[in-house]
């Protein structure tokens, strides 16, 4: 706390805000680095985990198709999707 008072001693209000933001960003960055170092995680491992959880297995989403009776059917599996795209 005394470090902050020393840093902000001769500053006007705008400069104080800027210095406080810089100090906060530096502190957050240090905390992130300490967390990564303490858990033996790397950014590559973290993003690999995130990508596996958010990756879609199917490239084509569900599609709505009208059948011969005029009813709307939602195609969720690969075969009906392929058939609906071929008939389009």
Image (tube, rainbow, N blue to C red):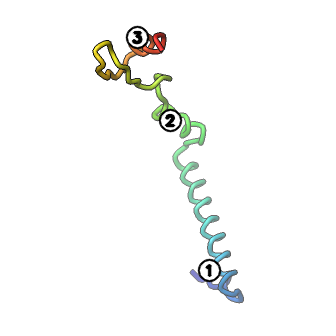
* Location of residue 68 with respect to 21 vertically, above or below: above
**Residue at the spot 69% in from the left edge and 87% down from the top edge:** 12
Residue 6 spot, x, y in % from top left = 66, 84
* Location of residue 38 with respect to 47 vertically, above or below: below
**Residue at the spot 38% in from the left edge and 16% down from the top edge:** 77
* Location of residue 11 with respect to 19 vertically, above or below: below
User: Left or right: where does residue 80 sit relative to residue 45?
Assistant: left
Along the polypeptide, which appears first: circle 1 or circle 3? Answer: 1
- For label 3, the residue is 79
Of 6 and 51, the residue lying toward us: 51
**Quadrant of the image occupied by residue 29:** bottom right
| Label 2: few (<14), some (14–19) or many (≥20) C-alpha neighbours in 10 Å | few
Of 50 and 28, the residue lying toward us: 50
Of 16 and 31, the residue lying toward us: 16
- For label 1, the residue is 4
Residue 33 spot, x, y in % from top left = 60, 54
**Residue at the spot 60% in from the left edge and 83% down from the top edge:** 2
- For label 2, the residue is 49
Residue 42 spot, x, y in % from top left = 59, 41
Along the polypeptide, which appears first: circle 3 or circle 2? Answer: 2
Of 49 and 68, the residue lying toward us: 68
């Amino acid at each position: 706390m005394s470090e902050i008072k020393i840093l902000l001693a001769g500053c006007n209000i705008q400069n104080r805000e800027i210095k406080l933001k810089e100090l906060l960003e530096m502190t957050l960055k240090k905390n992130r680095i300490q967390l990564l170092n303490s858990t033996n995680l790397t950014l590559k491992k973290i993003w690999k985990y995130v990508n596996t959880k958010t990756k879609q297995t199917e490239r084509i989403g569900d599609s709505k198709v009208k059948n011969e009776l005029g009813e709307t059917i939602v195609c969720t599996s690969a075969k009906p999707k392929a058939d609906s795209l071929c008939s389009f």
